[in-house]
Image (cartoon, rainbow, N blue to C red):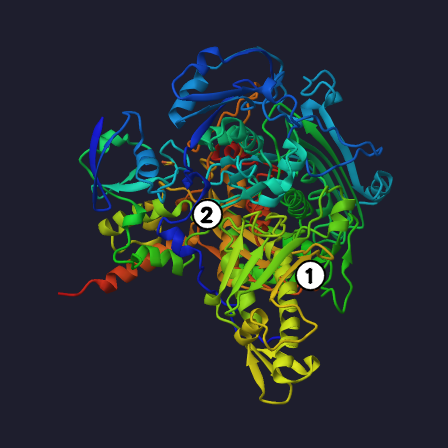
Amino acid sequence: MQIRVKVNGVDYTHDVEPRLLLVHYLRDVLRLTGTHIGCDTSICGACTVQVDGNATKSCTLFAVQADGCEITTVEGLSTNGELHALQEGFKEMHGLQCGFCTPGILMTMDEYLKINPNPTEEEIRHGLKGHLCRCTGYQNIVKSVQYAANKLKKEEVPV
Amino acid sequence: MSTMNGMVGKSVKRVEDKRFVTGKGKYTDDIILPLQTYAYFVRSPYAHARIVNVDTGAAIDMPGVLAIYTGKDVEAINGVPCGWQVNFKNGDTMKEPKHPLLVADKVRHVGDAVAMVVAQTREQAKDAAQMVMVDYEELPVVVNAAEAVKPGAPQVHADVPNNICYDWELGNSKAEVDQAMLEAAHITSLEFVNQRMIANAIEPRSYNAFYDEANEKYTLYTSTQDPHLIRLLMSAFVLGIPEHKVRVIGPDVGGGFGSKGDHYAEEALLTWASQKVGRPIKWTAERSESFVSDAQGRDHVTKAEMGFDKEGKILALRVKTYANQGAYLGTFGPAVPTYLYGTLMQGLYTTPKINVDVTGVFTNTTVVDAYRGAGRPEATYLLERLIDLAALEMGMDPADIRFKNFVPPFDGTNQPGYQTQVALLYDSGNYEGVLRKGLSMLGYDDFRKKQQEATRNGKLLGVGFSTYIEACGLAPSAVAGALGARAGLYEMGQVRVQPTGKVTIYTGTHAHGQGHETTFAQVVADRLGIPMADIEIVHGDSDSMAFGMGTYGSRSLAVGGSAIVKSIDKVIEKGKKIAAHKLEANAGDMEFANGKFTVKGTDKSISFGDVALTAYVPHVYPADLEPGLDFTSFYDPTNFTYPFGCHIAVVEVDKETGKVELKRFIAVDDVGNIINPMIVEGQIHGGVAQGIGQALFEGAEFDSNGQLTNASYMDYCMPRADDLPMFETTNQVTPCPHNPLGAKGAGEAGTIGATPAVVNAVIDALWSGGHKVKDIRMPLTSERVWRAMQASVN
Ligand code: FES
Ligand code: FES
């Protein structure tokens, strides 16, 4: 089946098997390997990307279901070579160790901070619920998200 | 000796992070080679069954299929070896049945691999695997170690009577311990299970192998913790191909926790088949496969008794453990419940008589091997549960009883190390110190008041302590050899100074989240007086570095870092000669500091960069010196390192439901000198989360048919962000006296200390409400806690 998608701002048209998962499309066809597979059953969140702005576990979707959509992966998070506030936060606050869970968490939290720019610790922990990290114990992930939230607030120019 | 330029001890941000946060990490499954093909495994759905027939006829004709291999095809190849030998008490060697690459005769656990299909695409390989028809004849199954040794139990291996792999003991004689127990005023005894754990690194195991026919060379990309070890085991012990014709690369690895330290059959199979197929072959485990084929951890059934005098001083400890090894021996398998468990039974206490007796047992379950902490969490759990329970039973304070029994402080330099009853010589320690610090962070007196108040209000509040020690920095080769290791456990560190004074470091350790690229660079920056930006740390490629034992047992900094320091010393030594020649001085008069070689007492100096350039452009050069500035060292530690600490958990238990809420978690860890506090803290956090996971959430559940009933992330419950509080962590620093960095290792401390603290806290909470419960089987689910309360209604 033919699909047309826009990924990180670039248009693609591909013929794909109907059973091809979106995550495999991104990784194997587009070679965007920043999106990871941890469980292939929609539980770990490592494969999270944004589909039309919504954080979505890409192992849950077939590539054909994304036909016509705009997709952002972790590779599309930073702009002009500058780290996104979340990426910076994770580096500053040691929010990652092996880094395998990180791209998925970044994509979820990017959406989350747009919905809730002033999250409490508890809210961040709740927002992370769809993700598994086996390395960090989450504490520094929470701090990384707080760092990003603060940075994004400062960047907002008061009108 | 150089002076420090101040990087060591700082929370330098990690240099590796940029690639990870931008999605540019390179994990094995990210690698797609030209003409890539894919493997898929046919695995046994039964825990124990004879293979009557394997029919690949229909599968081989499926689209895209290139080859199918079954157990018969690899019968002539060795199995995957075990790296450690444990002996029976009578001196006999442990039973070591073959662990075949693919099974031909009978499967011994669910997930045992029966056939491998190679096809053009992943989907084609999977489709064809479904068409491989295997006829099984089911056999009776045994999953529990204590059951498996009973007469009449199903036999996992025909040539291993009663499924006993080894029976092993350590410490004082049983008679001595029995005698000491006779004098005890109180004996606390506990029969318990340390449940089976699954490491569950979020990156599944992944391998990609290819054969370069023109150069007759194999390359294997593997998600491993120890590339050189894999190369050695695979080339020399399994496939019998020359080691120099095999290159093993461990690229970025998404967490290991012990389970990626093993040499796995799939690694050897892919490598072997890549030559036959003539194209690269990749395999990445699906999560359901990881659950049944990754080496698992723990799984002990134990009875332990601790005898006390009436003041609460420990007189003796007696331990009997049945350790489940799974269906075959893992690479480190038999070492974990013996050398890494029995040897820790001294704990932090002066217990004068200890006997530990371990029976290693085969069952129809997945292989059991090292899981973060490996043996040491099991030992700590045993000791810390016993001592806390003893305090409750004897009406003593759990902190007091520990203070009474601690080995007094010693620094290992002015005071000698502490010789245990169980073979180890502790290097340095201040055990009271960490407990004191923990108590003050907790606000102990205040806590007990709050607890009484809670009781009055019908609430169950509890505190649990765990004061642990671990043996890390694996390991002095001679000791490891005496303990049955079939390899030395030194480490290699190479310092290659480039002509411009930039430095490339090659280490034989492997990072899979630990941040070596940062920590090691900090050490080098300080010692050479150059900026971190001028240093690159390279790891994980058997063709780039001389050798390496890899990363496990919290060894990388203590052993691998020390090897680098040795090479740095050699660089400086040679640099002094070059500098002296240039400055027309005596090498003996040179000193090196802040990146400069200076003639002592003068202002005549030359920079490190100039010396490097001179070494490679030796126009004006000492006649007796070789050009170049590049040293490789092997560091073999003289002892293990012994990190220790105190973990404290505060919980509230819901009376109605048994639900445990973890209110606070305090960790005071002494890991020796710290290079990067941020990274150490991160290691502790992650370890603590896994330790709490074992106490409250996790555990592999095999049913009596040998089916793992919770073989998915949905069913195997790992802690998520909202299950955990903010941890309160701090450090005490007692330097390691026997390595140049004074570092002890931090990778496993959290997992070792945390579990008993949490369980002790729950038990304490129950006792505060009058439920005199001795034990609840981990994980402490609401149901189990509730049932325990019901069974002990006051
Ligand atoms: S891989 Fe998609 S949620 Fe785990
Ligand atoms: S950093 Fe390793 S899984 Fe999260």
Identify the disc placed on residue B439: none
Tell me if mark 2 has few (under 14), some (14-19) or many (20+) residues whose alpha carbon lies within 10 angstroms of its own.
few
Looking at the rendered image, the disc whose residue lies closer to the viewer, 1 or 2, is 1
Q: What residue is drawn where x is 68% and y is 57%? A: B635
Q: Quadrant of residue B191?
A: top right
Q: Is residue A151 above or below residue A129?
A: below
Tell me which chain the residue with mark 1 is part of. Answer: B
Q: What residue is drawn where x is 48% and y is 52%? A: B664
For the residues labelled 1 and 2, the Cα–Cα distance comes to: 41 Å
Q: What residue is drawn where x is 40% and y is 26%? A: B120
What is the quadrant of the N terminus of chain B in the image?
Answer: bottom right
Mark 1 or mark 2: name the one nearer the start of the chain.
1
Q: Quadrant of residue B558?
A: bottom right
Residue B547 is left or right of residue B710, and the answer is right
Q: Secondary structure at mark 1?
A: loop
Q: Secondary structure at mark 2?
A: loop
Tell me which chain the residue with mark 2 is part of. Answer: B
Give how far across and how far down residue B732 sits, in percent: 59, 64
Residue wearing tag 1: B429
Give how far across and how far down residue B695 sits, in percent: 54, 41
Residue wearing tag 2: B457
Give whichever of B362, B662 is nearer the camera.
B362
Tell me if mark 1 has few (under 14), some (14-19) or many (20+) residues whose alpha carbon lies within 10 angstroms of its own.
many
Give whichever of B754, B643 is nearer the camera.
B643
- Going by the numbered disc 1, the residue's amino acid type is Gly
- Going by the numbered disc 2, the residue's amino acid type is Asn
The answer to whether residue B582 shows anywhere in this view is yes
